[in-house]
Amino acid sequence: MGTGTRLAGTVVAVTAVFAVAWGVGASTAPRPAPPPAVPSAPTPPAAAPAPAPPESRVALVDGYRVRLDGELVPGGPSQVFATITRDGAAVTDLEPHLGGFGHLVVLRLEDLALLPVRSGGPAPAPTDRSGPGLAFTTGSTAPGTYRLYLEFRHAGAVRTATFAVSAREVS
């Protein structure tokens, strides 16, 4: 028997097994009615977008007061400055953190786009200290609401200050 004959026999056998298993074939018996349709769960209404957070340029975190100055100007890079104080006194011994004395993340709330951010100057040595001011330059912005997250290290601990800032067209 040739390979073609064996293959044809195998195909017929497999087809017969599926026909028996699935009830396919010539049958004169009436088929049972299909089960009633199960009503689907109602589709919830589309969620309304969350309201924009109120603008906040001062953050209090673990006894530190962090003030954010500068504007996010649509269409080009923007400079922002953070000033860190504790108990009313300037913090002048910020420790290096992630290649600078502070790390800023800028997130546009409308589409969760991250803006590139640069801090000024070369990376500090592990023993360098700085403060109370930190300067950053953001990438090109678009109009909208932004969350800014500033991480800084002081006394061996990393803290995060959160801000809400709007970028508006300059008229």
Image (cartoon, grey):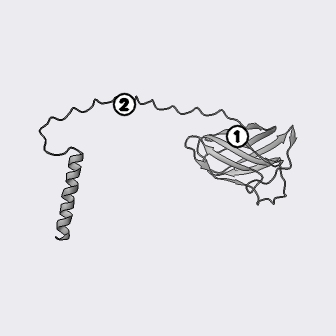
Relative placement, left or right, of 135 versus 8 is right
Residue that badge 1 annotates:
162
Q: Decide: is 36 above or below 80.
A: above
**Which marked residue is nearer to the observer: mark 1 or mark 2?**
2
Relative placement, left or right, of 43 versus 160 is left
In the rendering, at what x and y percent does residue 156 appear? 81, 49
Q: Residues within 10 Å of mark 1 (few under 14, many from 20)?
A: some
In the rendering, at what x and y percent does residue 70 appear? 72, 44
The answer to whether residue 75 of the structure is visible from this angle is no
Residue drawn at (21%, 32%) of the image: 33
Tell me the amino acid under the disc marked 1: Thr
How many numbered dots are placed on residues in this image?
2
Q: Secondary structure at mark 1?
A: strand
Q: Residues within 10 Å of mark 2 (few under 14, many from 20)?
A: few
Q: Decide: is 89 above or below 14.
A: above
Residue drawn at (58%, 32%) of the image: 51
Residue that badge 2 annotates:
40
Position of the C terminus by quadrant: top right
Instruction: Give the distance between the C-alpha atoms of the residues marked 1 and 2, in whole angstroms.
Output: 43 Å
